[in-house]
Image (cartoon, rainbow, N blue to C red):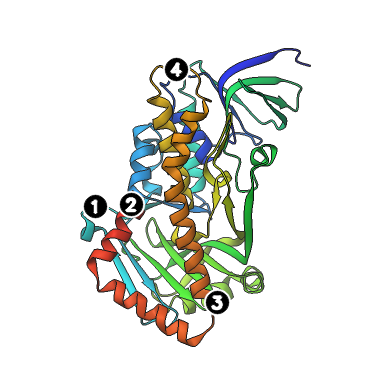
Amino acid sequence: MYNHSMKFDMVVIGGGLVGASLVAALKNSGLKIALIESREPPPIPKDESWDSRVYAISPGSTGFLRNHAIWQRMDASRVTPVYDMAVFGDDCSSHIQFGAYEVGVAELACIVENRQLQTAVWTALQSQNDDLEIICPTQCTAITWHESHAEIQLENGRLLDTALVVGADGVNSWVRQQANIEVSRHPYQQIGVVANFSTELPHRNVAHQWFRRDGVLALLPLPDNRVSMVWSTSEAHATELRAASPEQLCRRVGEAASHALGELQLITPPVGFPLNFVHVGSLIKPRLVLVGDAAHGIHPLAGQGVNLGLRDVRKLAEILNDRGLQSDIGDFALLRRYECARKEDILAMELVTDGLQKLFINPDPTLARLRNLGLEITNRLPLIKNQLMQHALS
């Protein structure tokens, strides 16, 4: 049993992609940091299997990860650039197309497996200096807030004293609960079903998305003739998809995708995760800041959840790295700069994703005609399309 506390400038609770990336971005900050994670560090992938969970990483996020020696640690042969995106309405004829060439970028996004990225960021942490202590696997049991610091109790009795607590522990954040931060949330009553397939036809580095009446289906390009599926659909339909035989699933996905990529063969079995909207009343409190899914929860139809979290990290790291003579990184005025910088972006993404989900799930035929017309009109207005793309690429 520990009878004394260890002092840190910052304690990050949650060692997923967002929390670990924040620690990596503060490598040369001069701060003494502890990273607490409840699970074992991610193992280095040693086989040729594919992770069914993937991310669409924007160029802005790619640049951030590269700047902090994370991106280049991944196996480049497992990373797939997206050059174009084709989005279809529920009448299958209305559509909108986005191209990297139109906005003068190399790619719209890169599709990366979760385990590849997790391993890369944790490998980067191994090169951190003595100012970082990684404590895992372990659980926090209590946080006590004081005016000048916070105290974190670990399950083994150890006590950590810190100027700033960073909650990076996911959409059901324990840290957020301990701080009594108000949250408004509603379930979408949908499941995100994910699986990987090999395809008969080449995907040509195009990401496809269909706004269907039974949900939103996306096929994202993987290396060679492979794609990753994300089908956000009703709980009943998701149960059917997960219970289907491999042949049945391939047939149903192929039909829903209008056979755009020919015949499909299943690579990884389907798994599902519930979809929820989560709006957090405040990103900060004295001695506390929230990042990633602890700070917001959005529908995956735009593929922007992880990028939104990485934008949190970019801004927080920038503020802390440029703090000048401010020695107390838990100073409330410093944290207010972070909240003011992030609130507009988060709110905009919440409104867009939540609004689109409600718009396309509505069965009203008049509304269906209007939303499909909207896709066609937007596709013919380069200025609006470019503004949408520039925000997503940031």
**Residue 263 x/y as whole percent:** 44, 74
* Label 2–label 1 contact, CB within 8 A: yes
Q: CA distance from mark 2 to mark 1?
A: 9 Å
Query: Could you tell which of marks 1 and 3 lies nearer the N-terminus?
Result: 1
Sequence-wise, the earlier of marks 2 and 4 is 4
**Residue at 39% of width from left, 79% of height from top?**
372
For marks 2 and 1, the one nearer the N-term is: 1
Disc 2 marks which residue?
393
Q: Note whether residue 149 is visible.
A: yes
**Disc 4 target residue:** 30
Q: Which residue is mark 1?
A: 105
Q: Quadrant of the N terminus?
A: top right
Q: Is residue 148 above or below residue 358?
A: above
Q: Is 5 placed left or right of 275 in the picture?
A: right
Upstream in the sequence, badge 4 or badge 3? 4
* SS class, disc 2: helix
**How far, Cα to Cα, is label 2 from label 4?**
31 Å
User: Residue 94: x percent and y percent?
Assistant: 36, 80
Whichever of labels 3 and 2 marks the residue nearer the N terminus, that label is 3
Look at the numbered disc 3 and give the secondary structure of its residue. Answer: loop
Q: Amino acid at mark 2?
A: Leu
Q: Secondary structure at mark 4?
A: loop
Q: Which mark is residue 214?
A: 3
* Label 3 vs label 2, nearer the camera: 2
Q: Give whichever of 325, 74 is nearer the camera.
A: 325
